Image (cartoon, rainbow, N blue to C red):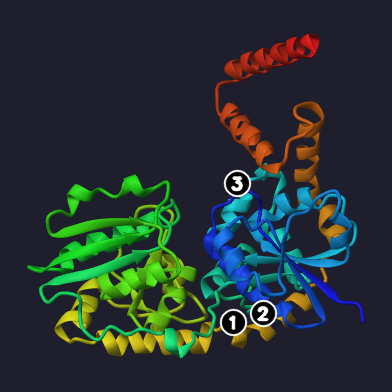
Amino acid sequence: MKKTKIVFYSRKDVVARGDFALYSRIGAELAENENYTVYYVNNPDATIRAQYRFSNLIYTSITEKNKKDFEGAIFIFPINTLFCLLEEIRDIKDAKLLCVLLHPNTLDWLANQTVKRWFDMSKLVNLLKQTNAYAVQDGDNLLKLEGKIGQSLEPRFFPVMMETPDSETIRLSLKNIEDKVANIAWLGRLDGDKIYSVINFLDNLYEALGEKTAKFHIIGDGNAVTRINISKYTPKIQIVFCSYLFGEKRDKYIMENADFVVAMGMSAIEIAPLKVPVVLPIVSPSPFREDVFLYLYETKYFCPGWSLDGFAKASLKGRTCEIIINDIYAEEKKVEIGQKCYDYAIENFSVNKNAEKVLQIIERTTLTVEQIRKEPIVKRQLTLFNLYRRFVNKNANWNRYLLFLDKFKLLMKRPKREIVKTVIKKLKEALCAKKRK
């Protein structure tokens, strides 16, 4: 019997450990089915690869030697990596595609890679709808996708997932870390898409503490960490930077130093087995101030972190930071809330409860790679990319082309005289370089 080939794809040179963990987790689960051969292309995280080294999941990359192995496969990929994928599989003729929205901003990230006058997002989304070629991580992403076409879509959830924990590995801290000091942890990256969630929590925590003081343990790092104004919160809040911690080291640190954890996405789900209260913040790529948060068990539609718009549309109530502080310390509900978070995570995010549903979504897609290449809104962007490779850099990949495109967009914002001068200068440089060769 011929096996169905499933390929989970991440673009090269990306830092997205949550994606690496999610795809590896569901990929390893699906690979246990003898009817499927499951690959993961471009996972650079050695720690995660080692975790699944005894599974049937195949970690690999696409090369000249093995590209024929992927003919007839179904590729699952984040929608913002569409053009990176099409560039990597340009020689593959027979394949199907499934786009996944893993973050509320992924549609914007995709649009930023295009010449927008020739790219209509609503047409792309309609194509995905017609071919059953989309899935969303949660309700927030579904609302975002629906907003692009102004109509409702069938919910197809591809949620973050967790391994069902072994009861022997679950550790439960019954008491608060300190009597007079609130001990709180942030778990996750500190990049531009998450940093304002951290800052918003700190702003609200500062006011909610009253006469109490706090230690705020930041477990993670990123290129936006310097946006946290530490002096703004001292001495009431002592911020402790821990960089990245994984596995047992992370779990041990949390159990010894945090009464509750603020986290979103995969981070929120992975620590739920510790039975520590998990608080979900609002997600925003820009500065904001909202005193509203959720315990993990209060969320809906598989969403471990809502945008402001999504939160309102989903009619969620939420809690203020002051209420959360009161719950944990005055009411001493740490154990009760932690247990509820754990139970909710097991019921909704266990990989063994979601694998079959995800497999059905994967098998329903009818979108072929040939079909999407011929779609005018995609074909125009690929034509520009191919022109760049022909006349500027024949060895460039999609990421190198994007660097050029960003510079070009900045150039077009200048006065016309400056544009002409710059173009002439670049043409002269190119001609001189050609003569030297």
Query: Residue 188's image quarter?
Result: bottom left
- The residue under the point 82% across, 81% down is 35
Q: Is residue 379 left or right of residue 93?
A: left
Q: Nearer the viewer, mark 1 or mark 2?
A: 2
Residue 113 percent across, percent down from the top left? 64, 45
Q: Is residue 372 left or right of residue 1?
A: left
Residue 247 percent across, percent down from the top left? 45, 69
Q: Nearer the viewer, residue 183 or 310?
A: 183
C-alpha separation, residue under disc 3 versus residue under disc 1: 33 Å
Callout 3: helix, strand or loop? loop
Residues at marks 2 and 3 touching, judged by CB atoms closer than 8 Å: no
Work out whether 333 lies above or below 115. below
Mark 1 or mark 2: name the one nearer the start of the chain: 2
Question: What residue does disc 2 label?
Answer: 29
| Quarter in which the N terminus is drawn | bottom right
Question: What residue does disc 1 label?
Answer: 351
| Quarter in which the C terminus is drawn | top right
Mark 2 or mark 3: name the one nearer the start of the chain: 2
Q: Nearer the viewer, mark 3 or mark 1?
A: 1
Q: Tell me the kind of residue under disc 1.
A: Val
Residues at marks 1 and 2 touching, judged by CB atoms closer than 8 Å: yes
- The residue under the point 19% across, 86% down is 332
Question: What residue does disc 3 label?
Answer: 112
Work out whether 351 lies above or below 57. below
Q: Is residue 249 left or right of residue 30?
A: left
Residue 133 percent across, percent down from the top left? 74, 69
Mark 3 or mark 1: name the one nearer the start of the chain: 3
- The residue under the point 74% across, 75% down is 362
Q: Tell me the kind of residue under disc 2.
A: Glu
